[in-house]
Amino acid sequence: MKNLPEVKMGIVAVSRDCFPMSLSERRRKAVVASYKAKYGDIYECPVTVENEVDMRKALADVNAAGVNALVVYLGNFGPESSEILLVKEFQGPAMVIAAAEESGDSLLDDRGDAYCGMLNASYNLKLRNVRAYIPEYPVGNADECADLIKEFIPVARVKIALDDLKIISFGPRPQDFLACNAPIKQLYNLGVEIEENSELDLFEAFNKHEGDERIPAVVDDMAKELGAGNKKPEILSRLAQYELTLRDWIDAHKGSRSNVIIAGKCWPAFQTQFKCVPCYVNSRLAKDGIPVSCEVDIYGALSEYIGQLVSEDTVTLLDINNTVPQDMYDEEIKGKFAYDYKLTDTFMGFHCGNTATNKLSFCEMRNQKIMARSLPVEVTNGTLEGDLLPGEATIYRLQSTSDGKLRAYVAEGEILPVATRSFGAIGIFAIPEMGRFYRHVLVQRNYPHHAAITFHHNGKALFDVFKFLGVNFDQIDYNHPAGVLYKSENPFA
């Protein structure tokens, strides 16, 4: 999968000068041994940091080893300034964790007090305006610390990737789609580069690809992927031409960045000029690790990419679209699942046809039904239609508000194994207390209608990612369980 950088984790032990350095080193070795036995390789820095000189030696060592994500391990109380300077000067994501005491018989000469040292480390981070990842409970024995490091990997991967990311957009956004507005200041704050282009630039590039000798091979690949769902073979050559246009644009415009995603234009003029819709091509790029959002939704594309980095799997972007009819709920959902979902816990997630084949229960190439109501059918071909694969799902989004602040939400649920009886790439979602979440998060907090989707439960990692990226924790929303009120919820309702 493209755009999925490798995380090379390293660990540096730190030691307060009035504690035995050997204690911190012994505990570091135990963490490394546990991690390697459970999860694989981690670079063990031989330098233990006791002062600023040691800090520079350790920094040079991990840099020389190619480490791009760092664990600062308090094997004892730790030198609070030197350890935080290490976090500050390391050019990558870093976490801080601390050692628990091992035994009641070792509380004289081998007591490390890292539980206390973590408090000073967190205070020093704030004083220096340095951001580090601190787990929910950051103190543990060797096995527990190894598990904490494993949980840090998806968070680190997101930060590494975003620091090397370019979003390419083709706009502007369609009229009346102000919900997809994208104040770009926060993209730069996140370390993301953006290249905004006119759709006319894209159309020019598309026309230059007419007759491209690579088109037949892409058509064959599309036909193979679609199999029996290849219901519109006459449109594949135009879709192949468009796919090659996007891939060549990425190669020519990535510049200094390794990772590239796209916020694409898909209407209203796209169909009449390109003589197709781009949905299936978007799905193929997403399957290849290049998420493409619809309707020039820049933060939607970014959200998709974050989900890909966390789940290491294909993602999609859907409208939080329509309610499930009462009769469908009564006949096919009520009382039939492990969780007793209410009608208001369910909704349908839909987009025209941008979801990858590997995330659909079945698929067919069709025309875009909504667009065909006002346009000739022959220019609306190119959607990939089918019901989403049932199973675990997480809906989430990172968004910049109109006044340039970061906000996010995340909610876990499932895609139900219930036929939608509808069109597009679509599925029936069930999320506990979705009705309240819809009103007091999505509506109350003014989120747009696009939600990014992973096909797993990734809520914990996504919540940690959003905090680590700088979203204030009171701006990260989730679906509150029954009895836990939202601030805007009427307690007398």
Image (cartoon, helix red, strand yellow):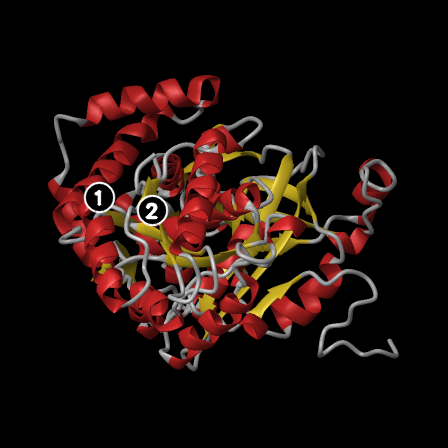
Secondary structure category for the residue under label 1: loop
Q: Is residue 260 rendered to the left or right of residue 297?
A: left
Specify the amino acid type for callout 1: Ala
Which image quarter is the N terminus in? top left
Residue at point 73%, 48% (across, down): 324
Report the residue marked by disc 2: 10
Q: Are marks 1 and 2 in contact (CB under 8 Å)?
A: yes
Secondary structure category for the residue under label 2: strand
Kindly tell me whether residue 233 is visible in this rendering.
Answer: yes
Where residue 65 is drawn, which disc sits there?
Answer: 1
Kindly tell me whether residue 176 is visible in this rendering.
Answer: no
In the foreground, 472 or 491: 472
Which image quarter is the C terminus in? bottom right
Q: Is residue 487 rendered to the left or right of residue 283?
A: right
> How far across and down, in percent of the image, does residue 471 sit?
47, 70
> How far across and down, in percent of the image, does residue 420 sit?
67, 38
Residue at point 35%, 73% (across, down): 81
Closer to the N terminus: mark 1 or mark 2? Answer: 2
> How far across and down, in percent of the image, does residue 172 sit?
31, 65
Q: Tell me if residue 325 comes above or below residue 387 in the rendering.
A: below
Specify the amino acid type for callout 2: Gly
> How far across and down, in percent of the image, does residue 132 sit?
41, 64
3D distance between C-alphas at marks 1 and 2: 9 Å
Q: Tell me if residue 341 comes above or below residue 388 in the rendering.
A: below
**How many residues crowd mark 2 within 10 Å: few (<14), some (14–19), many (20+)?**
many
Residue at point 71%, 79% (across, down): 488
